[in-house]
Image: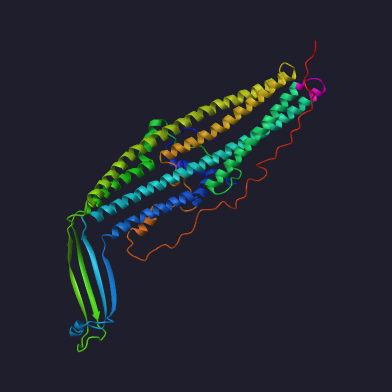
Amino acid sequence: MRAKFLSASAPASLMLACLLAAAPADADTLRDALVQAYSSNPTILAARARLRQTDEGVPIAQANGRLGVSADANYTENVKRGPASFSLNTPRRQVTGGLSANLPVFQGGGVRNAVQAARLRVESGRADLRSAEATMFTDVVAAYMDVVRDQAIVDLNSKQVDVLGTNLQATKDRFQVGDLTRTDVAQSEARLSGARSQLESAQAQLVSSRENYLRVVGKMPDNLEAPPQLPGLPANVDDAVGAALDNNPDLIAIKKESDAARHDVGVARASRLPRLSAVASGDYVNYLDSLAGIPQDRGTTAAVGVQATLPLYQGGGPGARVRQAEARVSETLEQTIAVERQVIAQVRSAYASHAASLGVIKSSQTAVSANELALEGVRAENSVGTRDVLDVLNAEQELLNSRVQLVSAQRDAYVAGFALLAAMGRAEAKDLGLDGGPLYDPVANYNRVKTSVFDWGDDGMPTTKASRTVGVPPPPSEVLQPMLEFQPVETPPVTTSKN
């Protein structure tokens, strides 16, 4: 389970994919959890839907520069006509219809800038989706390692309860023959009671971690395998920061958003420039034989032309929109620096946490070995009377503490290492080689809709794709083993002797 700094000639993403694929198939593996979450986690599915919304911004912007055609029809019944109407031979009824077309020729650059801004926001959305994937995978790894850690801690505490239970029985036996005092028995009872409470706390923490795993992955963990080592971690923090500044999806997203905001300024400026359109219209009228003495009471007309519009004064609206767009550019520029700072801090923090956890692992391994040896010696010395029961109990507790610290450090090192890869832009679906199903292609939907010109095109009302956890049963009984009844030994109160 221990993660190490590795240098490799092969790409880190390829190595990570190979390591994840190498796990046994007879138990739940980290790869299984990642595949499950990738296909059914509601957060990532919502992020994909959000990107598809952004994709539609391109055809929406393009529509403003395309040909527009409209038709109208009207039926009129003159139910009462004045005296002048008879002299003018006003029809009693009429039907009219018309067809008009408008083709924008020049819009001050507004359409071109709007389309380019929409395209840049699509690229920003793709980077946001990458970020969502990396965040979700980091959550999966953390949830996975939490269960592995807490299960190990429960096992350690359970064994400690068994050991202390055996110690208590041995202490009682020796007390019965007069080899130990009531104080020794009370100390053993107190340690056993404390161990039981620690076991209960550890079991409660395990249940919490399992429920968090269910929330993130979508299924309960089952016999989790130890995860593979993490390859491709940087040799120093400067390499990590450099890779993150080039590949971090959050930083890429805000830079694309800033570029899009610049084009928004062009859109706002276009509102005060001339506009030119080519127009065509055709009309049809039919008086429905309501014009007396006129045999031909129907006809058609057609016209083509060019329409130019020159805004002279719009109440200051265009200037306000331009200033608003310029302020948005300023905002995104500052946000870029803020995200850059955040990425640098995130990388350095993850690097430091990973390095510190490796140090804790090394120290804890030494402590476990030393405490195992110390416990063996204390027990031997207790058997010959040079150590008392409290010394044995303390040695057993020290060993338990060092083992728990080792398990926790292993979890922290692995999660920090994966978070470091994620911050560097190297912990996404394409890096992990998740072939449990086809990988989501964010470009496919964009290519499908970017040239759409059909007004009646839609994809139908969507349905939920994420898996629900309502029907997942709670942890089985073996996860929460019932506590044994604790029956303290009956001992008379301690009295002081009288002189």
Q: Of all residues shown, which one is farthest toward the right? A: 177
What scheme was used to colour the molecule?
rainbow
* Magenta span: 173-182
Residue closest to the eye, 166 or 284:
284
Quarter holding the C terminus is top right
Q: Position of residue 39 (x, y in %)?
A: 49, 51
Residue closest to the eye, 484 or 321:
321
Q: Of all residues shown, which one is farthest toward the front? A: 83
Q: Position of residue 187 (x, y in %)?
A: 71, 24
Compared to residue 18, the image places residue 234 above or below, namely: above
The residue drawn where x is 57% and y is 49% is 219
Compared to residue 92, the image places residue 374 above or below, namely: above
Report the side of 72 relative to 40 (left or right): left
The answer to which quarter of the image holds residue 155 is top right
The answer to which quarter of the image holds residue 486 is top right
Report the side of 115 relative to 401 (left or right): left
Q: Position of residue 251 (x, y in %)?
A: 36, 41
Residue closest to the eye, 78 or 464:
78
Res. 203 visible in picture: yes
